[in-house]
Amino acid sequence: MAEGGYNIQSHNNYPDRMQQSQQGASAGEEELATRTLFIQPKRFYLDVKQNRRGRFIKFAEVSAGGRKSRILMSMNIASEFRDQLEAFHQFLQTIGEHNSNNQQSNENGILRSALITRDDRKYYLDLKENERGRFLRVSMVGLNIPRTQIALPAHGLQELRDTLTDLLEEFGNEDDNDSVESPPAIEPAELPESKLIHVGNKNFYFDIGSNNRGVFLRISEVRANFRTAVTIPEKAWPRFRDNINDFILAMDKERNNTSAPVDISRLDSGNGDKPSVTPGDTGETNK
């Protein structure tokens, strides 16, 4: 994994991806985009995929011998990963070129580390060096998920960051951490149909999904060049419903109070709400 003057090239729709894309479609996944980085002697792929639970990114490494390693990331995790790539790149600028005779790493060969955590997955990022050069090792671990890792030569960090940034800008950064989880706990046929609400220039999508942790509702707000989403577990639905209902009742009450007619008969000059008093009411007689 030597550091050197390798050419890094980006390609769309690389030919040997066609078969994989067709296989993904048959499994309920749609491939929205793919980018290829050549960092010899390896190939790296960044694929944006979509299934019924949302969008996610698959980061894959293919070695010269054809061995493949894959790491899956939700769009939010990919955004954090992109930011960490920038931090590692900036760090490398401060420590100078690699020198095999004067390495700056600790006893484990690590120059800098970072951790990204989301739900039951952890992503370990370790910038390391050895006598052959510097590289970033990305490891993914999780419950019932075998550990997988990818090693990227350090001189490819900037290209990977730029490519990932382009994909995030094009396909959004929605909170879809459920999109890469385990198979659903409830079959799609048993879940309610999705709903759509148009409000002005916005569309609100209500999609029900499920995974090994249960059923959830994803509400997506979509307008031109913008998309955001929130995922709500089923156990929280009643509280959301009650809070929304409280807001509706409060606003209705406020509007009713504002529009209620004023009783001007009670606004007697200077007396306010006090009833008028006649001499007989006091028990006194005129003298």
Image (cartoon, helix red, strand yellow):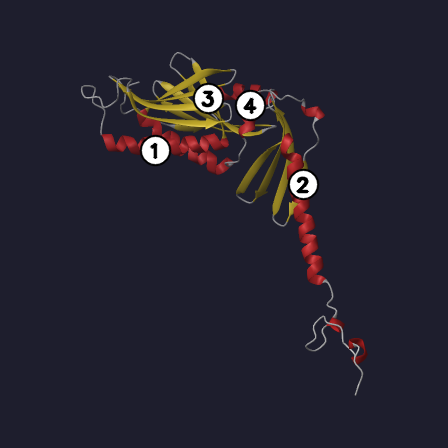
Q: Residues within 10 Å of mark 4 (few under 14, many from 20)?
A: some
Q: Find disc 2 in the rendering and name its residue.
A: 242
| Identity, as a three-letter code, of the amino acid under mark 2 | Asp
Q: Find disc 3 in the rendering and name its residue.
A: 71
Q: x%, y% of residue 32?
A: 53, 30
- For discs 2 and 3, the disc positioned in front in the rendered view: 2
Q: Measure the alpha-carbon separation of dots 2 and 4.
A: 29 Å
Q: Measure the alpha-carbon separation of dots 3 and 1.
A: 20 Å
Q: x%, y% of residue 223?
A: 57, 44
Q: Quadrant of residue 115?
A: top left
Mark 3 vs mark 1: which is more N-terminal? 3
- Extreme residue toward the bottom, this view: 287
Q: Find disc 1 in the rendering and name its residue.
A: 87
**Proximity of marks 2 and 3: CB atoms separated by less than 8 Å:** no
Label 2: which secondary element: helix
Residue 151 in view of the camera? yes
Q: Residues within 10 Å of mark 1 (few under 14, many from 20)?
A: few
Q: Measure the alpha-carbon separation of dots 1 and 4.
A: 28 Å
Q: x%, y% of residue 136?
A: 34, 23
